[in-house]
Amino acid sequence: SIKAPGWRRGRTGSVDHAAMDEILALQAELARVQEAPTAFKLSEPNIVEIVSTLSQLRLVDVLFTTNGKEYLTPEQLLREVGDEILSHGGRVNVADLPALLNVDLPHIERAVTQLLAAGRDGLQRVGGEVLTEYYLDSLAEEIDTALRGVGRLTLAEVAVAHALSTDFVTSVVESRIGALIHAKLSGGSLFTASYVARHLARVRGVLSALHGPASLPALLKAHGFNEALFYEAVGSLHAAGRLAGTLQAKTSFTPAVHRLAQAAAVGARYEQNGVVEYAALARMGVRDPRAHLAAEQPGGVQLDSCYMSPALVSAAEAGVEEALSGAGAADLRSAFDCDLTDADLVAFAAASASLSAAVAARRYLPLTAPLLAARLPRG
């Protein structure tokens, strides 16, 4: 005789007790028919037709397997899909379930949708896969274990190793930092505390050894620092006072020792010559020569191209006034040993209180930028 299609048992072997009494009665009746004389037996196609008709009449709610030899209820399919997710460690590709469960994909998709709606085990769908919360926790523990061995992992590496998107891995890691993953997340990479400490010590050592201005991008490249940790370390060290100097965002760092040496050199030049050219300070790396000289050597006179000491200004004033005392003309340029531009001489005449007063009183007449003439007395 032909064996009738049977009701599918769960993957754990338990019978679906949610099946209706009509189904059980039908199964018993089919068994009796099969035991009856051959003339009264139903063929397998007849049985399939009967079950199909009952299903169409909504007297029974069953799903056909792909080979047509078994039936199962939607509730049983839900349990079997859940069992497959569990047996795969909390992560399974939905496209693999039809072959595993011998059920068409549309039925599988409906079952997955129901499981997602129920929210059990934090189930979520990522692309074509379903993942549970316990799978993501185990992934985080695996990342933490791997990280302790190497000190540094990029999220891109983790994503490739586990066939997940970098954005998804980032969200998983961020929500478990400090709990399951004991690391620092910066710039798309994970770092252990010991790795960060070693990196910080290296950065401090390199910057502390500087004697002059340095480009931070150049240091980053030359010493192979991690970019995210490097700029963070520089900022924290400078803010804490452990790096004395001037920090210009992410562009450059000038150590304090350089500024001290620079100030000493400028002071010596100023004391010796009485004048310092702005261009000379710019070549020394001073960003704002005018402001630097005003702060370091207060009381001087700012000309167009240089900074002049009050003593040198007074001596020049005396020389000009002496030259003009005989009702002649004086070349202001001759009053200085250094080379001054016409703009410097104009600025000098404007800054000199005595010369400005004499010009305002029309005792001196400015002929050109460097020339002043004494006004002849009326006869």
Image: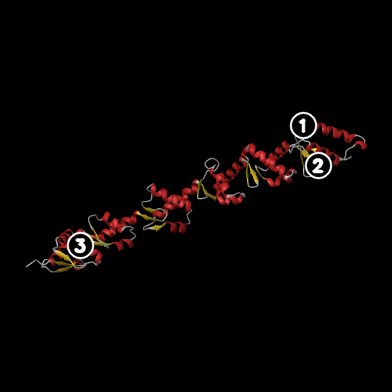
Q: Residue at x 89, y 34 (%)?
A: 35
Picture coordinates of residue 323, whole percent (x, y):
14, 67
Discs 1, 3 touching: Cβ within 8 Å: no
Task: Locate residue 298: give its quadrant.
Answer: bottom left
Q: Is 101 or 274 nearer to us in this picture?
A: 101
Task: Tell me the quadrant of the picture where the C terminus can be found.
Answer: bottom left
Picture coordinates of residue 88, whole percent (x, y):
67, 43
Kindly identify which numbered label has been placed on residue 20.
1
Q: Is residue 203 left or right of residue 351?
A: right
Q: Amino acid at mark 1?
A: Met
Task: Locate residue 276: give its quadrant.
Answer: bottom left
Q: Can residue 4 be seen here?
A: no
Which residue in the structure is indicated by mark 3?
A: 349
Q: Amino acid at mark 2?
A: Lys
Which residue in the structure is indicated by mark 2?
A: 69
Q: At numbered mark 3, what does the secondary structure look like: helix, strand or loop?
A: helix
